Amino acid sequence: MNVLALNCGSSSVKFRLLAVEAGAPPAAGRALAERTDAVREGDHAAAVRRAIELARNTASIDAVGHRVVHGGARFTVPTLIDDAVVDAIEALEALAPLHNRPSLAGIRACRDALGGEVPMVAVFDTAFHAALPERAVRYAIPGELAARHGIRRFGFHGISYAWATARVATLLGRAPDDLRLVALHLGSGCSAAAIRGGASVDTSMGLTPLEGLVMGTRSGDIDPAIIGVLARGEHVPVDEVERWLNERSGLLGLAGDNADMRDLVAREAVDPRARLAVDVFCHRARKYLGAYLAVLEGADAVVFTGGVGEHQPAIRQRIADGFAWCGLTLAPHKNAAHNGTDGVISADGSAIRALVVVADEERMIAAETVACVVRAGPARDRP
């Protein structure tokens, strides 16, 4: 089956056309075409139409898989898309405005271009965390308020974590069920996850993708009272403060003019604000690494993924420094050698292995799409 895997971000559309066999592992899918296009003036539909055109020039499209960031409590597995599913994803837009809106634009553009004959599947970033234990799901607010407004931890980057878990198991020659893993997805969006036996048991992002680690433009963890202080002090509504925390904070807010880790690392020796941004970023990541080692009562491996995690050996080293007490030590030559490539970067004899895994959400999306379509059966059998 030829699956068009679409990953619509706030400013780009990534696609890959993969030939995938039912039941085959995700890595087995053969890439037929791929590309990342910038979204111009917010027109995701035009970028998706271009992706479909490029893919069709290569091979037929038998199914489409869409990455959807927020599935709420309803969507805990990949789901065939129909009108009701589109409406439900739209209803969740307020919880992930930077993410669900582009996904919806991609879904609608695909439905317009391909019609109803090509099955489409929504693959949710939140699904990987759907079975979080209650102690990790709940916020310490009045239970009746949490229930009334659906306030709980959902977690994100689940497609990336599913891929990383599978790849670590392969690289270490172990079964996913046999691993305790701390995963750090570090990119423009950042999160951490504690994974036991292939399942998420805690994660840093919460009700929305704003909580947790310092990110490119998102603040991550803050004192909740800051929102009220800023709203009153700046005479703006809470919505505006939330926009600042999503779009003007994180590395950008600390450095003042840049959220690109490559530039900040290059400038930190001469720019105090760049140095502060990198220090805060690494400090927050170290806190979560230590916390999740405690949650898991030790770990078999720590994995770095995402654009920063894959391509910044110096950042990986700074996050891992000082963890020799628990058996985690990086080998500098291995760490430097894996710049955008999968591999083990821990020192020989390290009790906790450290690895780099290049994120490949599109392969997971394609594999999950095929599995969902096969489960649903032929078109005539679908509701």
Image: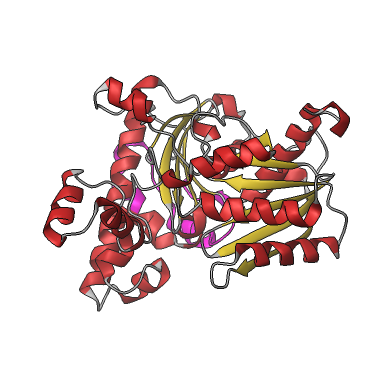
Position of the C terminus, as image quadrant, is top right
Q: Is residue 167 visible?
A: no
Q: How many callouts does the rendering have?
A: 0
> Residue 368, how many percent across, how many down?
69, 37
Q: Residue at x 65, y 62 (%)?
A: 45
Please determine whether, in this image, residue 297 is positioned above or below residue 188. above
Q: Is residue 250 left or right of residue 363?
A: left
Position of the N terminus, as image quadrant, is top right
Q: Residue at x 41, y 21 (%)?
A: 133
> Residue 316, how many percent across, how many down?
40, 55
Residue 96 in the magenta stretch? The answer is no
Q: Is residue 17 left or right of residue 165?
A: right
Q: Is residue 143 visible?
A: yes
Question: Residue 37 appears in which quarter of the rendering?
Answer: bottom right
**Residues in magenta?**
319-348
Nearer-the-camera pick, 74 or 223? 74
In the image as oriented, which residue stretches furthest toward the bottom? Answer: 270
Q: Residue at x 49, y 34 (%)?
A: 72
Please determine whether, in this image, residue 54 is positioned above or below residue 149. below
> Residue 285, how many percent across, how many down?
33, 48
Nearer-the-camera pick, 251 or 38? 38
Q: State the scheme by which the image is colored.
A: secondary structure
Residue 325 in the magenta stretch? The answer is yes
Q: Is residue 285 left or right of residue 271?
A: right
Please determine whether, in this image, residue 256 is positioned above or below residue 315. below
Q: Residue at x 25, y 65 (%)?
A: 254
Q: Is residue 288 left or right of residue 352?
A: left
> Residue 258, how many percent across, how many down?
35, 72
Nearer-the-camera pick, 186 or 151? 151
